Amino acid sequence: MVRYVSTRNAKTAVSSHEAVIAGLAPDGGLYTPLLNEDIHVDPAGLLNCSYKEQAAKIISVLFDDYSEEQIRQCAEKAYDAKFAADDIVPLRKFGGGWLMELWHGPTSAFKDIALTILPHLLTAAYQMDHRNDTVAILTATSGDTGKAALSGFADVANTAITVFYPEVGVSKIQKRQMQTSTGNNVEVIAVKGNFDDCQKMVKEAVSSPLVKKACRNVTISSANSINIGRLVPQIVYYYHAYSELVNSGVIACGEEINFSVPTGNFGDILAGYLARCLGLPVGRLICASNKNHVLTDFIRTGTYDIKRPFHTTMSPSMDILVSSNLERLLFMLSGNDDTLISNLMTRLKENGVYTVSEDMQKKIASLFSAYWTDEEECAETIRSLYDKDRILIDPHTAVGLSAMYRYQEESGDHRPCVVLSTASPYKFSGDVYRSLGNEKEDDDWQAMQKLHDLTSVEIPENLSGLYDLPVRFTRSINIEDGMKAIAAKMEELSHD
Ligand SMILES: *Cc1c(COP(=O)(O)O)cnc(C)c1O
């Protein structure tokens, strides 16, 4: 069986379903699978499978304490007509490579891929353990996770979900999406702080005595990518893109391809690394950042330094300084050195900076390349792709595309490259409209209509109907009141 250990204490191992229930490990570390050559997925065996079948096969290999039938049912329930594309994640050719459109799900962001299946994985895990407590899902969001999690968990039995988002920082459409969420088990709270404050709050709750005291038959879990149940389903689309390129004759099975990934919490790109570990022929993983380029600097120098100004940008889901999942990469590359990871994370917490060994930095640089893009270049990238190929992309995707161009120019590596397209351009209508060279339109709803009039690109249904829905959630709290608010919520959910 595949064992999952905490990045900060590798001695206590749990099975996958236990890791999915827990979210974060009790010591604050992240559950990470112990991989070896026997844990392998051959891409050749997936070439003629539907997305659902690929998902069932790949997830079963890593979540092997679930039955194959259980996983198959989870995939069936997740990847259905909720997605506006038949093959779930269509691959779209453009002049310089391929865009993998991960945003045809119910909330128009790539988070839907994992958050449509996570509630089912969690429910199945609960059934295995015959538990009757309530799972309280605490989720921090930089914009997209929140809505995708609210949508995935709405009215799922024995769960309740609370989402914390930064009051200033998410796009107006993202905010509206969250505030209009439906379901009797959902709550949305704005925090007077940034994403890092929200994420810290959620992580702290797991070990807070105040919160612990308030929980009676309530288990706290997370829908953030700190939950391994988020990451594993994201491996699937790397394989999917690969099969598509083999099936269309672009590459022979076995040839390597590159991926460029707009990165915030390092979850999406880590899934690409996990795919590589499982045997997918991945060449370079290009880590793309915006003006908050702490990861670019780290990958290039080996020093992770968050003592820097925090910028709000038009790619808000990447406005992050503490990238949680990097911890998993460092753990894996260090040969599961939990002591090292504990030390690095303590240094980060206390000093806001750490440096890895030269050996580790070299390992990272042999797998990943990193680039960052400022706001102006992001806008230019959106405009030039539209001008050349009549394809509309969102600012996050533009950051990924611009990194791909930079990488190709600098390295001369022109192997086929897939850019992960992570959100519908309509989620960021105002900025996309302006990027195309138009007057700024402050009203996002107007911008959506104008963008549509200009380009005739279809508006996803969940977004076009957004402004007809009633606003349900307007609560906002100070950072220092976080633990109290969470404890009160746990009290409310407690039962005998
Ligand atoms: C979350 C998100 C990202 C970053 O993904 P990570 O897994 O946090 O690195 C990029 N683009 C969009 C649109 C997102 O919602």
Image (cartoon, grey):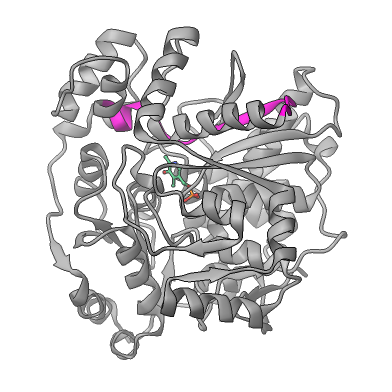
Tell me if I can see residue 65 in this picture.
Answer: no
Decide if residue 163 is on the left or right side of residue 116.
left
Magenta segment? 412-429
Regarding residue 167, the answer to whether it shows in the image is yes
Q: Say which residue appears at 42% left-offset and 80% top-offset.
A: 350
Q: Position of residue 94 (x, y in %)?
A: 58, 15
Magenta run includes residue 144: no
Q: Residue at x 72, y 27 (%)?
A: 412
Percent x, y of residue 192: 18, 62
Is residue 88 left or right of 112 when viewed as pictured? right
Q: Quadrant of the N terminus?
A: bottom right
Residue 424 drawn in magenta: yes
Answer with left or right where residue 287 lies relative to residue 65: left
Q: Quadrant of ligand 1?
A: top left
**The C terminus: image quadrant:** bottom left
Q: Quadrant of residue 16?
A: bottom right
Residue 422 vertical placement versus 142 (above, below): above
